Amino acid sequence: MTGLSQKTGNFPGTTVESHKGTVTIDGETSAEIIDLPGTYSLYPKSDDERVAVAALMKADKPDCAVVVADASNLKRSLLLCTEIIDLGLPTVLALNMIDIAHKKGLEIDILLLSEQLGIQVIPVNARKRSGIDDLKLAMKVAKPAAKPFYKVPAAIMQFLDELKPVIDGPNNYARLIQAHQVSQASHSKQNIHGIFEKYHFDSGHLQQRETVERFRHIDFVLVDCLSRNTHPEFDKATTFADKILTHKYWGFLIFFGILFTLFQSIFNIAQVPMQLLETAFENLQGVMHESMAAGWANDLLADGVVAGLGGVIVFLPQIIILFAFITILEDSGYMARVSFIMDRMMRSFGMNGRSVVPLIGGMACAVPSIMATRTIENTRDRLITIMVIPLMSCSARLPVYTLLIGLIAPEEYIFGFIGVQGLLLFLMYLVGFVSAMLSAFVFKLILKSKGKNHFVMELPIYKWPSGRNLWYSVFERSKTFVLQAGYIIVAVSVILWYLGSHGPGNAMQDIDKKYSSIDANADPQIAAQQKQTEKLEASYAGRFGQFIEPVIRPLGFDWKIGIALLSSFVAREVFVGTMNTLYSIGNDGQTVQEQLRNRYTPVTALSLMFFYAFALQCTSTIAVVYRETKSWKWPAIQLVFMTALAWLSSFAIYQLGK
Amino acid sequence: MLRFSVVKLSELKPGESAVIEHIGDESLSAKLFEMGCLPGEPVKLKFIAPFGDPIAIKVAGYTLVMRLSEANIVDIRKL
């Protein structure tokens, strides 16, 4: 509504935290809009729902609540709506997806509905952006409903009166909801619990009774407001699609086929734009070298910043394809079907069907995916999912894989259409997935499940992904990737350039002196190259790389890779930038990939690829795991086990393949 | 007189319909109630996931998914 670019998805849980935006209502009024995670009622069952309910209950509550309801599923949407009305908040009901309701054969009498609920009801179409102006006006004049929809039973009035001094709230219902929340919390004030016990407050029972009452009343309202004509064609199409997509064999085959196509197109479609970008950056580097006066500023900008940045920006086309695919899968309603067919399998690994969406999202980026696990109600299942998401190969690994696959596999096709490089990439993602599942299995053996473990989920109807939403989410995600990678890479490149061209004491000057006195018979080109190599070795970066070399030599890595490994502990994609910077310092016209191919064997590249597949080289992930688990214990365990896994697998590969 | 039998939701076969009678577990019923699965509500089994679990039912005009272990706590009345 604010035109704010935000990710939405066709299943609950796409929004797991609140987002804010500002909107102009008319000439002089503007309002701050807070988009809350979806919930079915004011009785939250998972962390994302708790965020929403807390925002409506807090002292600084919103001036007006807009409940966006699915018109094709009106009865269920009205439960939350009537609960919010009873909180005493000015409420507006925005009826979305009326077009789908029509297709289903449903007709809604909007005026009558508005009269019965005592609030304004505004039809909107979020996709076509119609009805938004009416909604804005409605918000401006919204008032609390004149009478509550559900009457708090007289039997508990005395209980609520006694709570008044300890639980504050604008009306009886708001106090009741807060009482429910307090009773769910593990620790609360002694005097409140005294009152609970005195009146035998049974949260679960009261909640059930209220829900049944509300639905009875809603049914009564809908008899007048909702009419139904059967449209069997719509149902038939959905049922047919469901039959195939959740089929015993076809279901899995289609899912596998979609992922396979994804990795093939990452390589095949992205090839041309990637080459264009690469040439552009090479030209830019050349132009900078020529146009600027020779000296440290020139070297720093051309070899440090541009080389490092170019190394990562080149991969943008691949990342856009990956993000677009994932957005389409989420938007269409397909991911909910995948959760459904995978639940049984995921359970064997200590997770559940709801873990699938965060895991697949982990192929784009672990950070939002770890937040998306808030929809998982069971604490253990959620924790295991969080622990293994970073093993899914994310988009930051894509540049690393692509660079290294170039050193291992030829640009050839099997049967003329299956690219070898794309196949190898698919296998690397499979390695990530398999290791995530196996690790989950190990965690399942260690962690005991406590509390209820329900898997009750709505299957949304199929929708064509909206072009606007696709554009926004791909654009936003790509922008974040470029900016984040950009800042880090520029910083790391500058530091690295300095550390790579300066050394302790007079080391650099000594090498200069040594080569100036070398006799003129030597080939000047080879001499210059040797001089550069010696300089890099003698530099701070070189010394540091050599310092850690003993730890990584059994994996087949030299000190140059060591520098890249260390710098990519901030973020993985820095590896490519670092290698570009390191190999741009004193290159002799060869591309970085050519130099790497001359220097490293395919076994080293494979070993390195597995290291990147498993190692937790991402400070943002560590931070978000701390935030979601509220403890340093879990990110610490994650860091240790993933680093061990990375080192051991690289060790095994290099020692066996050497 | 109508003859009916009370069975579990997990015993329903694809395409069969029934009416919800009672939900045995309190935390599950809290969840199912607010999603429209109330006593008296007609349900229809739509399809079953590849390994026989979970199941998808049609209720209150939309499709809801639950595990067999959950469907096992829901009593239904077949007409």
Image (cartoon, coloured by chain):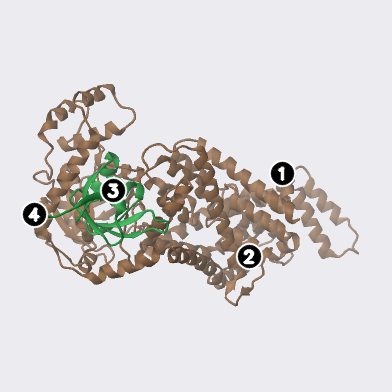
Where is mark 3, residue-wise?
Answer: A39
Query: How far is disc 3 from disc 1 in space, using C-alphas?
Result: 50 Å
Binning the other alpha carbons within 10 Å of mark 4 as few (below 14), some (14 to 19) or many (20 upward) gives few
Chain B is shown in which shade? green
Which label sits on residue A115?
A: 4
Mark 2 falls on what kind of element? Answer: helix
Which label sits on residue A551?
A: 1
Q: Where residue A602 sits in the image (x, y, percent)?
A: 71, 61
Horizontal side of A206 relative to A561 (left or right) equals left
Q: Are marks 4 and 3 on the same chain?
A: yes
The residue drawn where x is 49% and y is 67% is A257
User: Amino acid under label 3?
Assistant: Thr
In this view, the residue in front, A197 or A646, is A197
Horizontal side of A571 relative to A347 (left or right) equals right
Q: Is residue A595 above or below residue A448?
A: below
User: Amino acid under label 1?
Assistant: Val
Binning the other alpha carbons within 10 Å of mark 1 as few (below 14), some (14 to 19) or many (20 upward) gives few
Where is mark 2, residue-wise?
Answer: A285
Give the chain letter at badge 1. Answer: A
Tell whether label 3 touches label 2 (CB within 8 Å).
no
Which is more foreground, mark 3 or mark 1? 3
Q: Are marks 2 and 1 on the same chain?
A: yes
Query: How far is disc 2 from disc 4 in space, using C-alphas?
Result: 68 Å
Which is more foreground, mark 4 or mark 3? 3
